[in-house]
Image (tube, grey):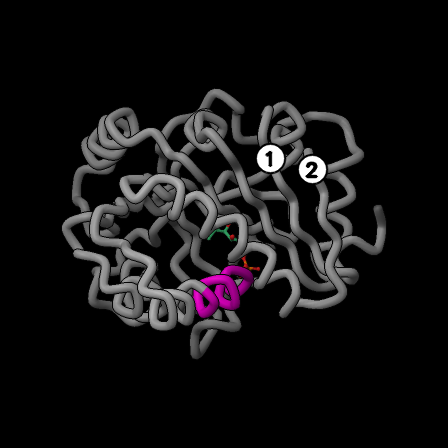
Amino acid sequence: MKIIITKDYEELSAKAAKVMLEVVKDNPYAVLGLATGTTPLGLYAHMIADHEKHGTSYAHIRTVNLDEYKGLAKTHPQSYAYFMRKNLFDGLGIDPENTNIENGMAADEAKECARYDALLEQLPRDLQLLGLGSNGHIAFNEPGTPFSSGTHVVTLAESTVKDNARLFDDISEVPRKAFTMGIKQIMQAKKILILASGANKADAVCKMVKGEVTEAVPASVLQLHPDCILIADREAAAKL
Ligand code: F6R
């Protein structure tokens, strides 16, 4: 794993944008695996600023997202589909037809997981962007998820519900279940970029990088990927 430590979140976002833009400029038909959450917001702002200033084209870029809350429609303001439109896709002018995310409203969970698995087979990711859960999760693969997992429905760990409550009016509104891409599929990406910011990620960063490769710390699997870059700010890297 290549590790880049930055002085702060702004530098982390700028460095992440450099990695992302290299992929997009290198291959205008690239498939990007994308993440939601707070961490990539700075990177997404840089991508939009670059698109506006330099006209980097996303006309042929296709995207696949990691996860979606179960029970939230894509029009729901807390859904990840909505988050992506608002924070990235609208700003880049990406055709919604070229974007993919699990359908949180799918009545048949198994069928929706099979649909997403098939889609991921057809869309090998040139770059997979990841955030890191404070409990070591990647996407919504919580501790204990088999490394061989494909798309599945998870019951979110209590710590994840608490971490995500800040984005809802009340913790009772945080969905308890989500669809998530599996670890096997994350590892299939040609390149992985994982971002970590803030002191509450320091333990997880340390276990991911220096700890044993174990399903108890899902992100530790990234030690086995041939082209994985971690960009962490000083606070998140404090225990390395
Ligand atoms: C989001 C996702 C999650 C987050 C992680 C960190 O699509 O899959 O794994 O990346 O929970 O979230 P933030 O960035 O909000 O700290």
* Residue 147 position within the rendered picture, expressed as x and y whole percent measured from the top left: 53, 24
The label number, if any, that marks residue 2 in the structure image: 2
- Circle 2 residues within 10 Å: few <14, some 14–19, many ≥20: few
Q: Residue furthest top?
A: 148
* Residue 216 position within the rendered picture, expressed as x and y whole percent measured from the top left: 66, 32
Q: Residue at x 37, y 43 (%)?
A: 32
Q: Residue at x 19, y 31 (%)?
A: 111
Q: Which residues are magenta?
A: 38-46
Q: Amino acid at mark 1?
A: Cys
Q: Residue at x 34, y 71 (%)?
A: 52
* Residue 47 position within the rendered picture, expressed as x and y whole percent measured from the top left: 42, 63
Q: Do residues under tags 2 and 1 come within 8 Å of each other at their CB atoms? A: yes
* Residue 196 position within the rendered picture, expressed as x and y whole percent measured from the top left: 64, 54
Give above or below for 233 relative to 226: below
Q: Residue at x 44, y 30 (%)?
A: 189
Q: Residue 35: say if magenta.
A: no
CA distance separating discs 2 and 1: 6 Å
